Image (cartoon, rainbow, N blue to C red):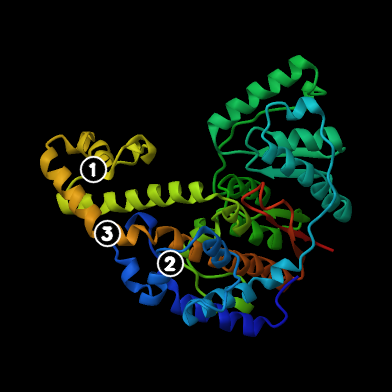
Amino acid sequence: MEPENIEEYVEEIQHLLSHYSWLFDFKMTQMLSGNVFDLMPVHWFEFGKDAAVEVLHDVAEGTPKDNWPPGLASFVGRCGRLRRWQLRCDEPTNESPLPEALTRGVSAKKRHELRRMVPAVAGLCTRTGSHLVMDVGAGLGHLAESLRQSTQLRILGVERDASLLEAAGRRRRRLTESGAAGCPACLRIVRCEVADSDSGQQRLQRLAAEFAAEPLLRLLVRLPEARALLLLSCCYHKAADGRLLSRRLATVRLGHFGRRLACQQSVSAWCHQSAADHARHATAVGWRALLEVVAQRTGLTVSDRRRHGTHRYANFAEYAAAMLGAADDNADCDQRLLQCTANDVFKQYGAQLRCVEFLTALQACLQPVLEGLLLLDRMLFLREHAISAELMPLFEDQLSPRTWALMAWKT
C-alpha cells in the first residue's frame, strides 16, 4: 500500500517540513531556552494553552473542528490526509499459539509481538524457500526460541549487548531445567569480533549487530544469500544523515529530530492517556525544560545521572535544587541564588508551561506522517531494486509502540 500519487505526496511533505519544522526540530529539553513557543502562531498558542484533553486528542488524531483557528485546522487536516494511505493497510489476523512455559514472565506486549512475528517470519521463509533465519537484535532470545519450537527453521540470533547475552543464557538454562527448552544441544552462544576484511555474510552479521536498518536494506539488495527481510519500524534517528534512500523521494530531507519524532509512541497510545497522565507528562517535560534555562543562567551543569521524577517534589524550586544543587559537578553552587533563579524562571515561563501538552499533541499529529514517509522510503527503495516489498501494521498500536513491519522478498 502506498499514496495514490507519490509526486503530490512528496510536495505536501516538503511543504510541511519547510513550514512547520519549528514543531520538531529541537530537543524537548530546550523548548523554552530555544524559544520554541515564540515561533508558534499567537492564535495557536492562545487556543492551545487552555485546550481540554478531548481537544488535544482531536489534534493528535488529525480531525480538525470548525471552531478552531484556520491555520491550525489546516495543519491538522493536512496531517490527517497525508497519513490516510496508512489506514488502508490491513492488519494481519494470523497469530501463533505459544507454549505457556515460553511466555511465563513475559509482558503482554512481548507475547502479542511473538504471536504475530512467528507466523509472519514462517510465511516469508515458506515464500522464499528459506531455512535459516537471522534474528537481529535477538535480546533474550524469545523470538528465536518461539520460532525453533514452532517451525523447522534454523535460527541465528545476533545481539551486541553482552548483558543481554548473559541474561539470555540464564533464561535458557531455566527453560532447560524446566523441560521447556526442547533440545539443549540446539543452542550455541558464540562471541566473536568481525574484521572489515571478512566475507559478505560476516559483514551482514556485523552490521546487523549494530541495529542499522539502512545498511541491512542495502545488503538485502547486494547479497544473493539474503532472500527475505522482515524489518520492524524502530530507531529511525540512527541514520547517518537526513537523506532518504529511494530515488522517488530523493528531494526530501528529514533530519535527526524529525526522525526522532517518527520513533515516538503511536497516536492511538497517546490518545488513550487520561487527563492525569497528560498533566504528569506536561509537568515532567516542562520542568525539565525549565531546568535547562536555570542551568544556563547559573552556569550549573545538568546531569542525566540525577534524573528524578517530578512527583517527588512540592514545587519546581525543590526539583531544581535536587537536580542542580546536589550534583557533583556543582559543588560550589550558591543555593540561595539557585532558588531565586528557579522561582524567577518559573514565573517567566508559567504561561508557556500551560501549552506544553498542546505542543506534544501537535507533534503526535505529525508523528505518523513522518514515520509513514520513512516507511514508504524503505519500501520504494527495495522495489526500485526489483525486490518485492509491502508494509504491514503487524502489531496492535495500543500494545506495541512500533506497529509497522516492512516485509520484503526476492522472487
Q: Residues within 10 Å of mark 3 (few under 14, many from 20)?
A: some
Helix, strand or loop at mark 2? helix
**Quarter containing the C terminus:** bottom right
Helix, strand or loop at mark 1? helix
Image coordinates of residue 253 in percent, x first then y, are: 50, 73
The first of marks 1 and 2 along the sequence is: 2
Residue 377 lies in what quarter of the image?
A: bottom right
Cα distance between the residues tagged 1 and 2: 26 Å
Farthest-out residue, top: 177
Mark 3 is on which residue type?
Answer: Tyr
Residue with the mark numbered 3: 349
Image coordinates of residue 239 in percent, x first then y, are: 51, 60
Q: Residues within 10 Å of mark 2 (few under 14, many from 20)?
A: many
Above or below, comparing residue 196 to residue 27 in the picture = above
Cα distance between the residues tagged 2 and 3: 15 Å
The first of marks 2 and 3 along the sequence is: 2
Residue 317 is marked as 1
Q: Nearer the viewer, mark 1 or mark 2?
A: 2
Helix, strand or loop at mark 3? loop
Residue shown at 13% from the left, 38% from the top: 335
Residue 48 is marked as 2
Residue 379 is marked as none
Q: Camera-side residue: 182 or 201?
A: 182
